[in-house]
Image (tube, rainbow, N blue to C red):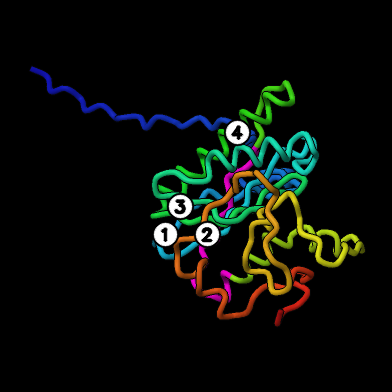
Amino acid sequence: MMARRPTRRRTPAQIGLPLKSTWGGARKGAGRKPGKVRPTPHRARPLLASRFPVHVTLKVDGSLPSLRSDRLHRCVKDCLRRGKEREGFRLVQFSMQDHHLHLVVEANGAKALSGGIRGLSIRMARRINRELGRHGRVFVDRYFARVLKSPRQTRAALMYVLLNSRRHAAQLGQKLAWGWVDGCSSGPWFDGWKDRKPRPPPDEEPPVVAPGTWLLSTGWRRRGLIPVNAIPGALAKQ
């Protein structure tokens, strides 16, 4: 019987395929296109202790009429009045600007804060859309929240919110009348003016509630009452 001759294994040849790079790596024009306004980053909300008030900012779609117009400011104020207090959430101060709102609120925690702001936002969006006969979004971004942890921070936030119209006017080179208080804010109900007593509209239910935290009721006053003619950011020692 003849022995089988060993066979030589052939190594398969690898055929090269020309590849055209069309994905990955740095490319001109790649990435998110820059916009005029950067959205609020989607970071986790910080933990919130109930003793700390919060300064909240809500941005409104720029295509809408000004919130300060007669048509809309009454709608917004009515929504704030109806949603100023719910379980674990209280609206203490506010001001409306053309396309954003500033709120000073108290909440029993981050969940109560989120629920309270969401409830107000939904209420306002539905009412504004109904008033304008439109559909679509009203608030264009997540709300921005700044926790206030000291009397100085709290007083500065109250000045910024209640005197925001004076700040915007000063930026435009305009000067508002002495003693003027913004009717599109909770200023007429505010009892912390240094040189003016509260003058709420007669027979009108307040759109805010009395503060419950020490910082908003007592603490900030230790830094001094707020002059009605101050311009936030312009008077560092005011």
- SS category of the residue bearing label 3: loop
Residue 19: give its label.
4
Question: Which of the 4 quarters of the picture holds residue 199?
Answer: bottom right
Q: What's the distance in space between the residues labelled 1 and 2, CA to CA?
A: 9 Å
Residue designated by label 1: 48
Q: Are marks 1 and 2 in contact (CB under 8 Å)?
A: yes
- SS category of the residue bearing label 1: loop
Viewer-nearest of labels 3 and 4? 3
Residue positioned 30% across, 30% down in the render: 9
Residue 202: % across, % down: 69, 48
Task: Give the magenta-colored segment's residue range.
Answer: 139-154
Q: Are marks 3 and 2 in contact (CB under 8 Å)?
A: no
Callout 1: few (<14), some (14-19), or many (20+) C-alpha neighbours within 10 Å? some
Residue positioned 79% across, 63% down in the render: 167
Residue designated by label 3: 44
Viewer-nearest of labels 3 and 2? 2
